[in-house]
Amino acid sequence: MNVIEITAFGAPDVLRLGERPAPIEGLGEVLIRVAASGVNRPDVLQRTGNYPVPAGASDIPGLEVAGEIVSGDAQAMAAAGFKIGDRVCALVAGGGYAELCVAPVGQCLPVPAGLSDVEAASLPETFFTVWSNVFDRARLQAGETLLIQGGSSGIGVTAIQMAKALGATVLVTAGSDDKCAACLALGADHAINYKSSDFVAELKALTNGRGVDVILDMVAGSYVAREVECLAEDGRLVIIGLQGGIKAEINAGLVLRKRLTVTGSTLRPRSIEFKTAIAKALKDRVWPLLASAAIKPVIHSTFAAADAAKAHTLMESNQHVGKIVLTW
Ligand SMILES: NC(=O)c1ccc[n+]([C@@H]2O[C@H](COP(=O)([O-])OP(=O)(O)OC[C@H]3O[C@@H](n4cnc5c(N)ncnc54)[C@H](OP(=O)(O)O)[C@@H]3O)[C@@H](O)[C@H]2O)c1
């Protein structure tokens, strides 16, 4: 089968079209003929040597696919309500940039009604990550306020729509006025251009000094101290990315006085059981919102898989809003 390989750690042109033997599914797994593969920032980190592949996962990049089930563990498929020929999207721990991909049955979800393969391939990584972090770890409730750092990212466009659909007020930061406008068009209540204004001061003004209940952070570094300032009493900060660095110095007094929670997680190395539980929650709570178009995939651009290097170059240029997808 054709795959996109990381031939060495480095710039986007280390991504090359190659050939590998087709993978063989095992117990509890299906084999998917991939129509489209989503691109995520963790793929860029893997390509540059900054995100090691978890034990047992494919070294081929790619954490999400959509396509057709071509074979699989009959018993597991029947138990999950799938059959050969079904269109699915799946979260995988690697191997997504390939014409064929093995996925645990529990990490597959049906392609929501009306969505194309490209749209479906854009869903799993950000939907699993946002659900797990914003709604499970940080326990965002209807009526609460969420700040999303990087609102126009693949993660951000999912978090905006999911949080709005489930009844939260949503504030975002983004690095340009155009990106702020895109976030507002997706339903965000307020967007702060963090390059032209101080997000701490703006957020305090917007919330009458109260602060927000939950912050989804993909920056960390010096942002953590400022985020601790932005949280309301009993606020929760959930860190999912380290684009601003791994070290943070915070005012621990604010953590005590406001009874804050600082947490974070990374999805890829978690167990199949853990991811299966997220898939079930998404199917019950979020897939109906995709079917009714209350939540829509946001596709910035698609590339033929052979042009994966161009897709990574675009992602690293930070010009995109939403998702970049490869097609086979
Ligand atoms: N923990 C997990 O399980 C998990 C899973 C998936 C992704 N992630 C992480 O989530 C992040 C987003 O991933 P993605 O695939 O959605 O990538 P993406 O679309 O490339 O988004 C990256 C975003 O970061 C924003 N950004 C960079 N510096 C910023 C700053 N100082 N303040 C605010 N925003 C800033 C950029 O926006 P501007 O251009 O506006 O600056 C851009 O929108 C990445 O850090 C990724 O590693 C974590």
Image (cartoon, grey):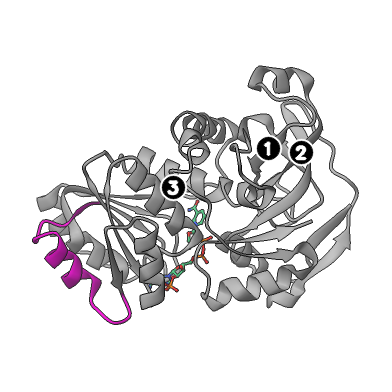
Tell me, yes or no, whether the highlighted magenta stretch contains residue 209.
yes
* 253 sits to left or right of 242: left
Tell which tag, 1 or 3, sits nearer the viewer.
1
x%, y% of residue 327?
A: 74, 58
x%, y% of residue 51?
A: 60, 61
Corner quadrant of residue 195 = bottom left
Tell me, yes or no, whether the highlighted magenta stretch contains residue 19.
no
* 55 sits to left or right of 256: right
Specify the label residue 131 is tagged with.
none
Tag 2 near tag 1, CB within 8 Å: yes
Between residue 51 and residue 300, name the one nearer to us. 300
Sequence order check, earlier mark of 3 and 2: 2
Question: Is ligand 1 less than 8 Å from the beta carbon at label 2?
Answer: no
Give the distance between the C-alpha atoms of the residues marked 2 and 1, in whole angstroms: 6 Å
Corner quadrant of residue 87 = top right
Q: Secondary structure at mark 2?
A: strand
Which amino acid type is shown beneath numbered disc 3? Val
Between residue 6 and residue 160, name the one nearer to us. 160
Q: Secondary structure at mark 3?
A: helix
Can residue 10 be seen in this snapshot? Answer: no
In magenta, the rendered stretch is 194-213
Specify the label residue 130 is tagged with.
3
Specify the label residue 88 is tagged with.
1
x%, y% of residue 187?
A: 35, 55
